[in-house]
Image (spheres, rainbow, N blue to C red):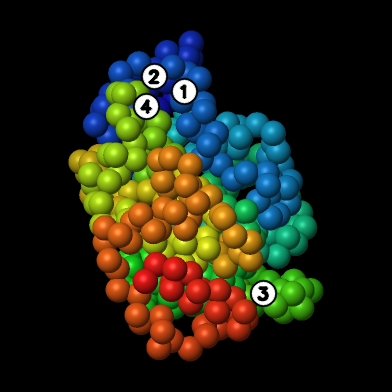
């Protein structure tokens, strides 16, 4: 078995579990150390697959007759292919090339997309060898909300249930913070993948399906802070200090806007860096993404990006003292779509706390 970055083998995993590094500089950051064990590799591969806590994860796995408990087996079943990077696993006897298997250019099994968005139970009756070649990014897409990748006019868009992405996008745009843009999905875009029952439920709870364009590619990968922290631990480096060195201004801006949005979901897989796949080097911070758990009503949310135990407010106050980010554009904004007057007042109140 081999781990590859596109068509370049970078790690050889032998039958006895011995791992032989073939290209150190292009290893995943979570594996970029001198001695890699089989357990290290299994843990890395397992962490690539969807969590059983994701909406409709059980339905996805059941439809493909894949294990709900063995994430390593799930990873091998889909070759570990992901839209976050260009790594994949090639097992003994597999003669496929990157061009044939990569998710960036090859068609998806669309019935899996339908399950991912609607939870529809679909019986997939293909033979075992056909199931082994199921092509879908849904098995390696992280997060808890219902979501699915759809190809539109040659580009890939992640559609998901998450109305708060829209007001968060408007606020971050006003403040000129680099982030992934979201828009409301049209009926035409999602009608083939959402059952009428699912559409009615989404509308009844005041939710919306939104989408964003894929920001990674064959050439650029996402490296989450979780992976980066592991890498730093191998060499005795402080991951927060190293993140600040990379772009202190962006790091501080992230802490300021997380407080303004009252975002309680900036966990270690929801921020990070971009990597050049040719060199294996980090090029800078990834634009901010995933804000569908922002605008929570309770106070004293703890920061997940500060090194020490700080609330979002304390981290933002400290960052704003140094950065003096201009927040005045929020004063002339109208209440964004999907926010109540009370929620918008809370946003402006947090903005005033930093002024």
Choose between 103 and 132: the one closer to the eye. 103
Question: What residue appears at the point 46 percent right and 23 percent down from the top-left corner?
Answer: 40
Q: Where is residue 169 in the image (x, y as percent from the top left)?
A: 45, 73
For residue 207, the mark is 3
Specify which label sits upstream in the sequence, 4 or 3: 3
Choose between 181 and 252: the one closer to the eye. 252
Marks 1 and 2 in Cβ contact (< 8 Å) = yes
Question: What residue appears at the point 63 percent right and 66 percent down from the top-left corner?
Answer: 297
The local secondary structure at tag 3 comes to loop
Do we see residue 122 in this rendering?
Answer: yes
Do we see residue 98 in this rendering?
Answer: no
Specify which label sits upstream in the sequence, 1 or 3: 1
For residue 36, the mark is 2
18 up-or-down from 74: above or below: above
The local secondary structure at tag 1 comes to helix
Q: How far apart are marks 4 and 3 (CA)?
A: 40 Å
Q: Position of residue 87 (x, y in %)?
A: 39, 40
How many numbered marks does the figure carry?
Answer: 4
The local secondary structure at tag 4 comes to helix
Quadrant occupied by the N terminus? top left
For residue 4, the mark is none
Marks 2 and 3 in Cβ contact (< 8 Å) = no
Residue placed under numbered mark 4 in the picture: 233
Q: In which quarter of the image is residue 128?
A: top right
Residue placed under numbered mark 1 in the picture: 40
199 up-or-down from 18: above or below: below
């Amino acid at each position: 078995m081999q781990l590859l970055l596109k068509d370049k083998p970078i790690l050889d995993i032998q039958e006895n579990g011995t791992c032989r590094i073939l290209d150190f500089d292009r290893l995943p950051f979570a594996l970029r150390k001198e001695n890699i064990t089989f357990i290290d590799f299994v843990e890395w591969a397992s962490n690539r697959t969807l969590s059983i806590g994701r909406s409709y994860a059980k339905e996805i796995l059941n439809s493909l007759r894949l294990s709900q408990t063995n994430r390593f087996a799930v990873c091998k079943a889909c070759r570990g292919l992901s839209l976050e990077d260009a790594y994949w696993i090639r097992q003994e006897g597999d003669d496929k090339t990157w061009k044939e298997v990569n998710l960036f250019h090859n068609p998806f099994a669309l019935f899996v997309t339908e399950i991912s968005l609607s939870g529809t139970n679909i019986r997939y009756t293909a033979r075992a060898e056909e199931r082994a070649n199921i092509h879908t990014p849904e098995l390696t897409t992280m997060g808890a909300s219902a979501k699915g990748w759809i190809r539109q006019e040659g580009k890939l868009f992640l559609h998901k249930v998450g109305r708060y992405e829209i007001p968060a996008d408007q606020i971050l745009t006003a403040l000129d913070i680099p982030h992934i843009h979201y828009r409301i999905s049209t009926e035409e875009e999602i009608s083939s993948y959402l059952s009428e029952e699912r559409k009615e439920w989404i509308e009844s709870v005041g939710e919306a399906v939104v989408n964003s364009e894929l920001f990674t590619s064959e050439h650029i990968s996402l490296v989450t802070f979780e992976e980066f922290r592991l890498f730093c631990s191998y060499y005795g480096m402080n991951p927060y200090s190293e993140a600040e060195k990379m772009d202190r201004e962006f790091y501080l801006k992230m802490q300021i806007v997380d407080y303004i949005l009252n975002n309680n979901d900036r966990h270690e897989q929801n921020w990070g860096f971009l990597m050049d796949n040719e060199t294996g080097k980090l090029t800078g911070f990834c634009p901010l993404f995933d804000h569908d758990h922002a605008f929570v009503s309770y106070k004293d949310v703890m920061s997940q990006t500060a090194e020490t135990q700080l609330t979002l407010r304390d981290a933002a106050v400290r960052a704003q003292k140094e950065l003096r980010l201009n927040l005045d554009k929020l004063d002339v904004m109208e209440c964004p779509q999907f926010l109540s007057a009370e929620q918008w007042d809370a946003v402006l109140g947090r903005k005033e706390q930093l002024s």
